[in-house]
Image (cartoon, grey):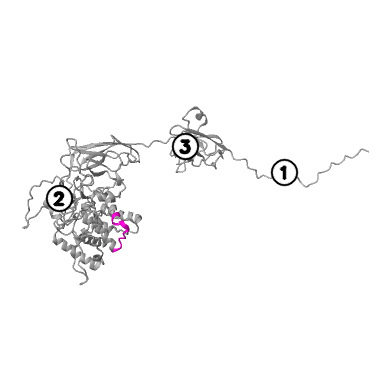
Amino acid sequence: MAPHIGRRLRKGAATTAVAAVVMAALTASQAPGLASTARDRHHDSAAGETPAPPSADTPIDGGSSYHTDLPPLQKPGKPGTSIDLPGLPDDAAAAEAGIPATVLDAYKKAESALKESKPGCNLPWQLLAAIGKVESGQAGGGRVDAEGTTYKPILGPVLNGNGFARITDTDGGAYDGDTTHDRAVGPMQFIPSTWATWGRDGNGDGEKNPNNIYDAALAAGAYLCAGGRDLSVKADLDEAILGYNRSREYLATVLSWFEYYKKGTHEVPDGTGVLPDPDKNSGGSDGGGDGGGGSESPRPLPDPTKPGGDHSPTPEPPTTGDGGIETPAPETPSPETPSPETPAPATVARLKAVGAAELTATAGEQFADKPRVRAETAAGKPVAGVWVQYEIRGETDARFPWNATRVSRMTGSDGTATAPVLRAGETTGSFTVRVTVVGRTATTTDIAATVKARPVPQADALARTDDKDLKAETGGSFADAVGVKASYKGKAAAGVPVTATMIVDDAAKATDKPTENDKGPYFKDAKGKAVRTLTTLKTDATGKLVLPKIYTDDHAGTFLLRLTTADGTTLTIELTVTEPAAQPTDEPSAEPTDQPTAEPTSAPTAQ
């Protein structure tokens, strides 16, 4: 592995020359004013130059190596408009324009977030894509899990002063697994000390992880926008890029990819992005095996989540000058830099769950504790720099952020690795979180987890919200709605389930489980059918409940409505139904006549 890495880390004259040609072309045509805006304080990282000690404005990546592959720029269509630029066949150009789906989404989300937080910056996502291409080959071709975290660390070279800046350890090996010197970490290659200042949580999991493309892209965007820069202004754009790595060759390479991506890109599946060519990449970032080597054409990568699988790209066999296969000599990894081809140190004997003995949460809520393990040797000593995978197993809909069932984290200097927050679904019961050292299925441990049902809200009192008499006539409905309020220990009881039942009078007096009435007032279901029991009622945030409209049949009398909570608190309400009032008839009444009353006649007197 060492000779292979060495080819990437040396900055060859040929690559420098090609970048200089592209730089000149961009200066003459697409990027006016480039040469004049590069400040004298932005020194060149020329081959063989001894880096100065890091200053307060040390670049993001510590001045470490980077991929120097150039985009497949096409030759100009009109003679004399520009010098000839390197080109690739159409199929290769199309492949290079593809960006892995999750990586592309992270760039666009970062652009959107910064439009709100720093609208004057005018950060284009294509700039993040250009830097991501140069720093890590788009997270090693998009080798990230569902939440955007790389399956294995992408690490730059050791910053020990040998060809790069000398930066002693600042993170206890928590991010880079190195407790002696720092290394650039993650798809956007932050050195730990810079990440401590600029780290962001881009995927909403409550963590700032440089190995997560969402976090890293947002952090990179914030760094590029620092100091009130407007990236639509050429001078600010150049200064921002040089702030990442103070090299004009780096600036030229990033600008060439920036212009290329602005002309058009498309989404490709995660894990199928084009990987930088190690033979062309004299300055490429090794990335611990994931961010570095590959081939010129995209190829699917093995599933890194399958137990026992090798998660590294299949290395291309090195060739000799005559085209034959060269057999590399056995290598012994430096104790300072673990071999990136090894999934985990051989000294890991066990994973020990630390923290809560069992994870518990209420349905729909977050678990109070995060899954956490400690990698140990047989002697019980911590092992740093180990990648472990957390996998949810069992009948559950609990998930990690972004609806993921598997996530990976690296152990810190104390040997511990903490999973992101775990959220319970609606399914109650027990399940396990299986933790495995990546690439070593024999080293596992299970963490028990339980999802409990939501507690039923209690109420120790039910009362009507008004004191109106509830009256209606047969064959109609009650004009006034029935409103009640539930309380518990004197405070409003929200979300209390309530059952409403039209009950038989005598049964209501004799038992706590009265009989439902089969006549009198009733409710209507969704289909308009008469029902006399409702079980789906619940008080609102203020503890109040308004019952649906109550109808009447042709039975008059006094009826009872009983409301009951789950814990047995009751309220009985009287409903009065009367016959309709008698209406006047339309028959005419007897009227007095205008005829005079007949007078009686006198009988004749006898003579």
What amino acid is found at the position of numbered circle 1 in the picture? Ala
Q: CA distance from mark 3 to mark 2?
A: 66 Å
Q: Residue 264's spot in the image, x, y percent?
A: 26, 61
Q: Residue at x 20, y 72 (%)?
A: 80
| Position of the C terminus by quadrant | top right
SS at mark 2? loop
**Image position of 127 with respect to 400: above or below:** below
Q: Quadrant of residue 453?
A: top left
Q: Which residue is mark 3?
A: 491
Structural crowding at the residue carrying mark 3, measured as other residues with C-alpha within 10 Å and reported as few (<14), some (14–19) or many (≥20): few
Specify few, some or many for label 2: CA neighbours under 10 Å numbering under 14, 14-19, or 20 or more: few
From this view, report whether residue 97 is shown above or below residue 463.
Answer: below
**Magenta span:** 222-234
**Residue for badge 1:** 590
Identity of the amino acid at label 2? Thr
Magenta run includes residue 542 = no
Q: Nearer the viewer, mark 3 or mark 2?
A: 3
Quadrant of the rendered structure where residue 15 is? bottom left
- Residue 484 in view, yes or no: yes
Looking at numbered disc 3 in the image, what kind of residue is underneath it? Lys
Q: Which mark is residue 145?
A: none
Vertical placement of 92 versus 415: above or below?
below
Q: Is residue 407 left or right of residue 329?
A: right
Instruction: Report the front residue among 147 and 338.
Output: 338
**Callout 2–callout 1 Cβ contact below 8 Å:** no
| The one of 319 and 558 positioned closer to us in this rendering | 319
Which is nearer the N-term, disc 3 or disc 2? 2
Report how far apart the C-alphas of labels 2 and 1 lie in the structure: 115 Å
Residue identified by numbered label 2? 314
Q: In front of the other: label 2 or label 1? A: 2
Q: Residue 377 at what x, y percent from top left? A: 17, 37
